[in-house]
Amino acid sequence: MTEHQLYPDTWVDNYADYLFNYAVGRVSDSEVAKDLVSETFLAGLKSAKNYKGEAAERTWLIAILKRKVIDYYRKSNSKKGKAEVRMSSSSYGDSEGDWLEEKVADPNGNMADGFMENEELGLAIQACIAKLPQKQALVFKMKTIQGISTEEICNELGINPSNLWVLVHRARTALMECLNQKWFK
Amino acid sequence: MISCEKAADICTRAQYNEASFTERMKLKFHLLFCKICAEYSKYNRTLTTLCSQARLKTLSEQEKLELKERMKSGL
């Protein structure tokens, strides 16, 4: 096993979007999701000395975020008195079947599958984007995810449109490669 | 006939609806004869579909700056 190390200075640039996608999938409110990501980083900083280097940095951060999501639902439950908690059983490996909802046949079963698949896909894409050179990643995200116009991106980054398209093209080619095995059937 | 580089350029812009009608016609014509570009173009379209299917979210640069500030101040 390789030893892993933590590099907190790079967390925001490398993992913020990945964690944010995960969180949005769980709490479906982007403000709450943003707070959870922020708390995850802070908790990570605080417990960095307990990091044993067994898991990769990102896996370790996701584990913290999962706890934060659970805490969030606990808190909002105790506030409301009672509320329905719907979580996928995968993040609750050891308490599987504790949720009544899961024991009842789910009429939207297929929809839930689609949701999980989309979430998995989203995380796979974010993980691949994180491997891109910084500028390619930035331009690709602005263009594809945030849908910002070419003109605006060029102004903001001080590049010309043909530079922009070269960066987008390289990013897309790298992403196709990175996602290839699993998602391009 | 346009070059493969030109075809790739048009193909990329077409994913964002930023290729003109003429350009798209030129691309289509090129793809008829160029297997490699045709394949690339297919993958490129798939990538576009996957990206919209995944409903990707990202934090803005401003929000990331705020995150970094918060980490520094440890609040």
Image (cartoon, rainbow, N blue to C red):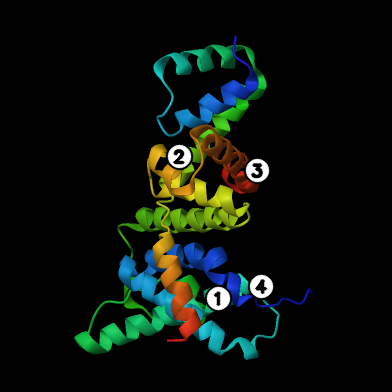
Residue A177's label in the rendered image is 3
Q: CA distance from mark 3 to mark 1?
A: 26 Å
Q: What amino acid type is highlighted by mark number 1?
A: Leu
Could you say where residue A47 lies in the image, as x and y percent from the top left? 57, 89
Residue toward you, B45 or A46? A46
Could you say where residue A143 lies in the image, as x and y percent from the top left? 44, 44
Could you say where residue A165 lies in the image, as x and y percent from the top left? 53, 35
Q: CA distance from mark 2 to mark 3?
A: 16 Å
Q: Nearer the viewer, mark 1 or mark 2?
A: 1
Label 2 secondary element: helix
Which quarter of the picture shows residue A111? bottom left
Q: Residue at x 38, y 85 (%)?
A: A71
Q: What amino acid type is highlighted by mark number 4?
A: Ala
Q: Earlier in the sequence, mark 4 or mark 1?
A: 4
Q: Is residue B46 positioned above or below A10 on the image?
A: above
Q: Which residue is mark 4?
A: A56
Q: Are marks 4 and 1 on the same chain?
A: yes
Q: Are marks 1 and 2 on the same chain?
A: no
With A47 as the anchor, is A31 left or right in this view?
left
Q: What amino acid type is highlighted by mark number 3?
A: Glu
Label 1 secondary element: helix
- Residue A116 visible in the displayed image: yes
Label 4 secondary element: loop
Q: Are marks 3 and 1 on the same chain?
A: yes
Which quarter of the picture shows residue A79? bottom left
Q: Is residue A177 positioned above or below B15 on the image?
A: below
Q: CA distance from mark 3 to mark 4?
A: 22 Å
Residue toward you, B62 or A98? B62
Could you say where residue A38 lies in the image, as x and y percent from the top left? 43, 76
With A9 as the anchor, is A120 left or right in this view?
left
Label 3 secondary element: helix
